[in-house]
């Protein structure tokens, strides 16, 4: 059996913009200070957990207390829920993502999982906002590991448990950022890049295979 793992923001859902907006607002409210750098590509570990730890350290010169992390999580979910009702257009499916996801779920020789740098609560809000049904599909988030490679390892572990597998013959991660590529490589996984904006950044980062949409004919 093979394993395919999907990212969420920029891969299954077009929610990068609203996610950044809500996350920055949430952490700034809790810190009562401004975030100094929102260029996520400049950070080594781009997950909600790792970013929160580093931003607190950079801005307040200390790590966040557990209750402060929980406050950021809670406020982020509140803001995402609010905006999903106020501006549903900010929460859109990546074209063809649902169809391709269901197709892979129907393949008897493929296991499917999701691995995202978001926390669990915000991931669920974004999937629900685009009416994305992940019933029975393992979801690994930044609640389980602080780094993307760690989250990918957790997704594989959950998929093995769900399907009773000791190992998978092939493992593919589908993502949209250079750090998704680096994370897949660190876990010895194949990488399938999706570049819906046509930026070319994944090619520049060395991704061997990049598609522009899930509507393309794919031979995995």
Image (spheres, rainbow, N blue to C red):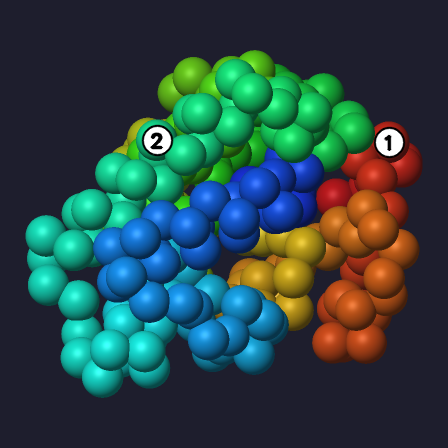
Question: Is 179 rendered above or below residue 17?
Answer: below
Q: Nearer the viewer, mark 2 or mark 1?
A: 2
**Residue denoted by label 1:** 215
Question: Could you tell me residue 41's position as x and y percent?
Answer: 59, 72
**Residue denoted by label 2:** 78
Residue 199 seen in the current view: yes
Question: Could you tell me residue 87's position as x and y percent?
Answer: 62, 24
Judge left or right: residue 86 versus residue 66: right
- Residue occupying the point 40% across, 67% down: 34
Question: Is 71 rendered above or below residue 121?
Answer: below
- Residue occupying the point 34% across, 31% down: 78
Q: CA distance from mark 2 to mark 1?
A: 33 Å
Q: Secondary structure at mark 2?
A: helix
Quarter of the image with the C terminus in it? top right
The image quadrant of residue 136 is top left
Residue 170 seen in the current view: no
């Amino acid at each position: 059996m093979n394993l395919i793992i999907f990212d969420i923001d920029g891969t299954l859902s077009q929610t990068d913009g609203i996610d950044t907006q809500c996350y920055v607002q949430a952490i700034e409210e809790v810190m009562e200070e401004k975030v100094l750098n929102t260029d996520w590509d400049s950070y080594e570990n781009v997950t909600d957990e790792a970013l929160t730890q580093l931003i607190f350290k950079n801005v307040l010169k200390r790590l966040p207390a557990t209750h402060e992390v929980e406050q950021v999580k809670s406020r982020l979910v509140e803001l995402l829920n609010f905006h999903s009702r106020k501006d549903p257009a900010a929460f859109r499916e990546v074209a063809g993502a649902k169809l391709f996801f269901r197709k892979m779920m129907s393949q008897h020789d493929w296991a499917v999982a999701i691995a995202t740098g978001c926390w669990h609560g915000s991931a669920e809000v974004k999937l629900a906002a685009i009416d994305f049904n992940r019933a029975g599909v393992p979801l690994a988030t930044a609640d389980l590991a602080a780094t993307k490679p760690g989250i990918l390892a957790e997704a594989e572990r959950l998929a093995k448990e769900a399907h009773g597998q000791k190992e998978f013959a092939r493992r593919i991660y589908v993502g949209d950022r250079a750090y998704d590529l680096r994370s897949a490589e660190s876990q010895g996984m194949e990488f399938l890049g999706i570049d819906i904006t046509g930026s070319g950044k994944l090619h520049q980062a060395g991704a061997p295979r990049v598609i522009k949409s899930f509507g393309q004919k794919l031979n995995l």
